[in-house]
Image (tube, rainbow, N blue to C red):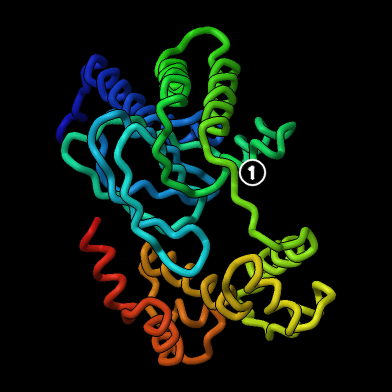
Amino acid sequence: MAAPLALDRRWIYLGLGLLITGLYAVFVPLLAPVFGLPRARPRHWAGALLAMLGMLGLVDVAGVGAASVPLNLGDLLTVVHALRGPGVITIMPLAVHGFRWTSDVKGIVFTMRESHVRTLLARDESLRERVLASRCVQFAPAHRKAVKTAVEALHEEQTQHAPWRASAIDAAMTALFVALGRSLPAPAAAAGVGDRSVVHVQRFRALVDERFREQPALGDFAAEIGITTTQLNRVCRAVLGHPALAVLHARLCLEAQRELAYTTLSVKHIAYKLGFSDAGYFTRFFERETGQSPSTWRKEQLARQ
């Protein structure tokens, strides 16, 4: 019988070292956001940032280059936003989006856990609501230096390993969001819209987010809010510019796009998940909302990646 193969200890140690290095390279970037630490990407960056699973993305575009960003802002349509630096792109969790960069674009991409950002900004509700929204914004000259300084400070803290790093990163993140909040235009109030109408619409949209897969009747939503269906349509038109049913359809369409873009589920499976009893009816609904069949829309998204 052949003698067992003897292994040199040096090779065993080398193998263990390579294994540990590989595990570090794989898991440390994945675990960093779990503890609230932002992940930064290189200055030259192209591709699709998937802001999913409670993560939000922040892209700083420096003073050169340009980006074209198809981005769904949670309303009825995915709009292509053109941005030339210096500017910022914020992507909230689960927002359907993509990027098309010019070859000379420069900037930094941060990925942060939304829940951690909300904790950091818990004392300043107005700041939190100002910055935590998907948008593409070009900075006015007066704000460029402050935002640039804040971005560079966060990037420096994130890439080095100085003492009290986590606290320093939290402080740098807060400073960046303050700089962003000060640089962003104040939200325009809808003319002639009262506070009560806005509250009704906010409640309606929250209910739609909770129950859109059930596809309840508008009367059910209105009853839960404490108003009539006619009043619900009236406040939606006044605040959003759309009837109430369009808000529900937009939410269904947005979720369908997310499933088509980020999963490999069949069209039939997606239809059933969204409360459609018939895949054919779902296809007709999707075509009416987007102008394309679900299969065609998915193919185009894959071709762009």
Image position of 46 (left or right of 222) = left
Identified at 69% across, 77% down, the residue is 234
Q: Is residue 152 above or below residue 205?
A: above
Q: Nearer the viewer, residue 242 or 14?
A: 242
Q: Assign a secondary structure to mark 1.
A: helix
Q: Residue furthest right?
A: 226
The local crowd at label 1, few if under 14, some if 14 to 19, many if 20 or more residues have their Cα within 10 Å, is few
Tell me which amino acid carries mark 1.
Glu
Q: Is residue 9 above or below residue 122?
A: above
Image quadrant holding the N terminus, namely top left
Image position of 257 (left or right of 190) = left
Q: Is residue 162 visible?
A: yes
Examine the image and state in which quarter residue 251 appears. Answer: bottom right
Mark 1, residue position: 129
Instruction: Please state the horizontal and vertical placement of residue 305, each as a whole percent of the image.
Output: 24, 55
Instruction: Please state the horizontal and vertical placement of residue 88, each as a whole percent of the image.
Output: 41, 37
Instruction: Please state the horizontal and vertical placement of residue 171, each as a whole percent of the image.
Output: 59, 19
